[in-house]
Image (cartoon, rainbow, N blue to C red):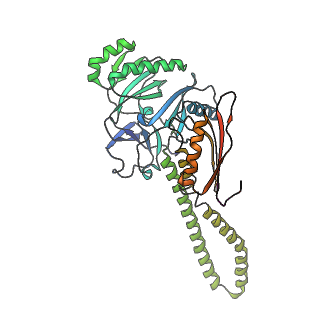
């Protein structure tokens, strides 16, 4: 969605959501929404900010100024960290600091289940981008829908977020995270910790400050900010499917409108021809002959569009792909590198650390009721001498379809 948003939907502190209007002088709170399903449609051009618990963020160093190269490197790092599968679409990367080559990869993990029709026309981001942090390297601790979240800022941009069980475990969380940053060569020296819980700070703030050697202060609730940040492509799968379906419906409506206009124009044209003198009938017949090839082209276009009906539904290939990936082990030690799904054939290529995972996946696919009309075959896995990983290739051909 390329339009500039006019509203922001942010997770509220305790439960539900808060809808804000974007104005020239800042954001104005419009209303609280407890249940999006029952609140009716959102205003047009609303940007939805997922809570911290719904996204996973990985800070990374990317030494390139080319946008495509940066995104390719980011995707590789996310896949190596087991945060992203090779076919995932709900992810993005943004630049945090150009001087330090610091970027942040964002992956949509478990968004709140909502009806796709509510979200299909909206854009998406993450809540951490909408808090003012100043120019210092800072850590902000806020509540989002009843859970505490840590937001790490550098150059006024968030580059890492984490949810915590309670403020009492804040010190151990921060120590482990800062050690991890150091191991990953992420330069981050927090100059301030801001916490939105005055009661807890009065009892524990001084101990936390002495333990971490970082100043701690109370962060009062204040309005979020919006500086025109770009939309992040962290879009729920159901919304992607709904957009494809909607786009297909809009094309059909457009074609129907064009056809109706052609019929109306044709009717007016014929009526005028009947009123003309007999010597113009021959001219009308000649025009009809000239229009005939265009009509044939239109018929051919309609046939091609009808063939696209299957593509414009969710039944294929998304359903087939979902059944395939549902058999991957939970820890994703076995990984797919290629999944090609066509009308009558399925090709899967991947790698595995051992033969047992492959031998477990192959019979599961053969027994899967969804593929009962397919015949499966698998080549003997080949071991890579450097990585010691086994490469495998599985194929399925629809019975009575293309020959092997």
Is 187 rendered above or below residue 342?
Answer: above
Q: Is residue 103 or residue 131 the one in the foreground? A: 103
Say left or right for 197 vs 307.
Answer: left
Instruction: State the extent of the magenta-drawn residues as a range.
Output: 397-401
Return the x and y of residue 275 as percentages of the image width and height: 63, 85
Say left or right for 368 vs 166.
Answer: right
Q: Is residue 194 or residue 114 the one in the foreground? A: 114
Query: Which is the main secondary structure of the residues drawn in magenta?
Result: loop
Residue 306 visible? The answer is: yes
Q: Is residue 396 or residue 9 the one in the foreground? A: 396
Return the x and y of residue 58 as percentages of the image width and height: 51, 29
Residue drawn at 50 percent across, 20 percent down:
181
Q: How many marks?
A: 0
Residue drawn at 57 percent across, 48 percent down:
365
Residue 137 visible? The answer is: no
Magenta residue check for 8: no
Q: Is residue 256 or residue 35 the one in the foreground? A: 35
Return the x and y of residue 27 as percentages of the image width and height: 38, 37
Q: In which quadrant of the rendered view does residue 269 lie?
A: bottom right
Is 303 rendered above or below residue 66?
Answer: below
Return the x and y of residue 180 as percentages of the image width and height: 49, 20
Magenta residue check for 400: yes
Residue drawn at 48 percent across, 49 percent down:
238
């Amino acid at each position: 969605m390329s339009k500039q948003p006019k509203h922001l939907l942010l997770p509220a502190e305790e439960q539900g959501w808060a809808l804000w209007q974007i104005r020239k002088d800042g954001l104005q709170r419009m209303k609280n929404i407890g249940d999006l399903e029952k609140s009716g449609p959102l205003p047009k051009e609303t940007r939805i900010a997922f809570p911290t618990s719904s996204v996973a963020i990985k800070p990374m160093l990317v030494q390139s100024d080319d946008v495509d190269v940066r995104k390719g490197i980011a995707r590789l790092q996310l896949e190596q960290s087991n945060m992203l599968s090779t076919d995932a679409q709900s992810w993005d990367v943004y630049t945090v600091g150009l001087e330090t080559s610091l970027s942040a990869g964002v992956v949509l993990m478990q968004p709140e289940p909502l009806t796709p029709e509510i979200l299909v026309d909206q854009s998406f981001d993450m809540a951490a981008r909408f808090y003012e942090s100043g120019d210092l390297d800072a850590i902000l601790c806020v509540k989002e829908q009843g859970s505490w979240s840590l937001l790490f800022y550098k150059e006024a941009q968030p580059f890492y977020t984490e949810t915590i069980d309670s403020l009492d475990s804040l010190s151990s969380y921060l120590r482990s995270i800062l050690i991890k940053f150091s191991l990953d060569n992420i330069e981050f020296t927090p100059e301030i910790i801001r916490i939105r819980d005055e009661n807890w700070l009065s009892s524990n703030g001084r101990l936390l400050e002495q333990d971490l050697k970082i100043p701690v202060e109370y962060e009062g609730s204040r309005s979020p900010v919006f500086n025109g940040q770009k939309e992040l492509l962290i879009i729920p799968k159901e919304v992607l499917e709904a957009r494809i379906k909607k786009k297909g419906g809009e094309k059909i409506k457009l074609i129907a409108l064009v056809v109706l206009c052609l019929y109306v124009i044709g009717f007016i044209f014929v009526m005028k021809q009947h009123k003309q003198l007999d010597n113009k009938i021959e001219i009308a017949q000649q025009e009809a002959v000239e229009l005939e090839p265009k009509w044939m082209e239109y018929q051919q276009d309609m046939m091609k569009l009808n063939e696209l009906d299957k593509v414009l539904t969710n039944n294929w290939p998304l359903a087939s792909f979902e059944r395939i990936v549902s058999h991957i082990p939970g820890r994703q030690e076995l990984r797919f590198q290629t999944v090609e799904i066509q009308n009558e054939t399925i090709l899967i290529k991947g790698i595995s650390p051992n033969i047992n995972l492959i031998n477990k996946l192959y019979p599961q696919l053969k027994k899967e009721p969804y593929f009962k009309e397919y015949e499966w075959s698998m080549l003997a896995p080949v071991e890579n001498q450097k990585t010691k990983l086994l490469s495998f290739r599985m194929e399925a051909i629809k019975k009575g379809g293309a020959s092997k």
